[in-house]
Image (cartoon, rainbow, N blue to C red):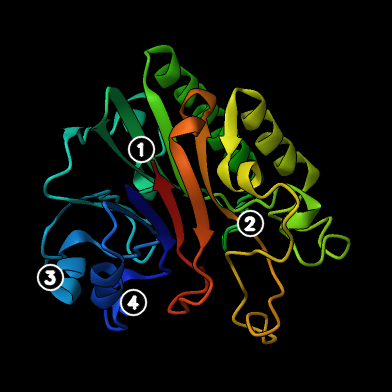
Amino acid sequence: MKIITWNVNWIRAVAKKWFKDFVYSEKPDILCIQETKAFEEQFLKELWELEGYKYIWHSGTRAWYAGTAIFYKNDLNIISTKNQFDENYHFHDDWRVTEIIFQKDSDEVVLLNWYFPNGWTRADGTEMVTYKLEFYDKLIEYMNFLVKTWKKVIVTWDFNICHTEIDIARPKENENSIWFLPIERAKVSELLANWYIDTFRYFYPEKTETYSWWSYRAWARPRNVWWRIDYFVVNKDFIEKVQDIEYMTLVEWSDHCPVKLTLK
């Protein structure tokens, strides 16, 4: 089984850049998208339907901002597409969460597709790190709730944090930068301490120079200078079902690359 996550940085732009060809070539069972930056009717106008797939779309209230979607194959055994997180918390307006529950073997698996706050100060001067940290706290709370109800959990996201120094090309230069602040990195450590696993570090604990986001400035991508901020995390009881994870760095239609998780 193959699950791909991708921050596309505007779905209407990548829809014009062989997006369908990518999907039909890879044939993921599930495709998670972040930063759609479009209302559903705008997305459908550009992309139309992906043959063989259904989708859910997180409809928020702000144009040109954030947004998430999940595409899944028609034959996938779906139990629910209800977004329980938004029923319990107050982040709905930012379009940050989509959720499905599917059956795999004897397990009910909850797949959470998230676009995390970046933490930068808003144009009106509003400080956003506090909001970002609250989002992490509620995520951990919600994931723990799911595990306690005997669900298996897969979380994929643009996390907007580099966890450790080997996840970033220039750690010393960025030690006081948003996305690499000690208080942010501590939240990732807290999450993993709650019996969750960063799948990439599970399979490749010492691997360096593997990144998922590159600035459009300063030729960052050709020089492979930037950050690993896109993750797949699973609860520890599910890691035995994971076969591998791959950062698809040759796919260049966004400032992020897709990430592919393969399940046994």
Q: Nearer the viewer, mark 3 or mark 1?
A: 1
In three-dimensional space, the C-alpha distance between marks 3 and 2, rounded to whole angstroms, equals: 35 Å
**Which badge, 3 or 2, is on the more N-terminal residue?**
3
The kind of residue tagged 2 is Thr
Check the image and report above or below for 49 versus 194.
Answer: below
**Which badge, 2 or 1, is on the more N-terminal residue?**
1
Q: Secondary structure at mark 2?
A: loop
Q: Which mark is residue 14?
A: 4
Q: Secondary structure at mark 3?
A: loop
In three-dimensional space, the C-alpha distance between marks 4 and 2, rounded to whole angstroms, equals: 27 Å
Name the one closer to the observer, 72 or 170.
Answer: 72
Q: Is residue 89 visible?
A: no
**Which badge, 3 or 4, is on the more N-terminal residue?**
4
Q: Residue 120: percent from the left, percent from the top?
A: 63, 57
Q: Mark 1 highlights which residue? A: 111
In three-dimensional space, the C-alpha distance between marks 1 and 4, rounded to whole angstroms, equals: 23 Å
Q: Nearer the viewer, mark 1 or mark 4?
A: 1
Q: Mark 3 highlights which residue? A: 48
Q: Quadrant of the C terminus?
A: top left
**Which badge, 4 or 2, is on the more N-terminal residue?**
4
Mark 3 vs 1: CB contact within 8 A: no
Q: Quadrant of residue 65?
A: bottom left
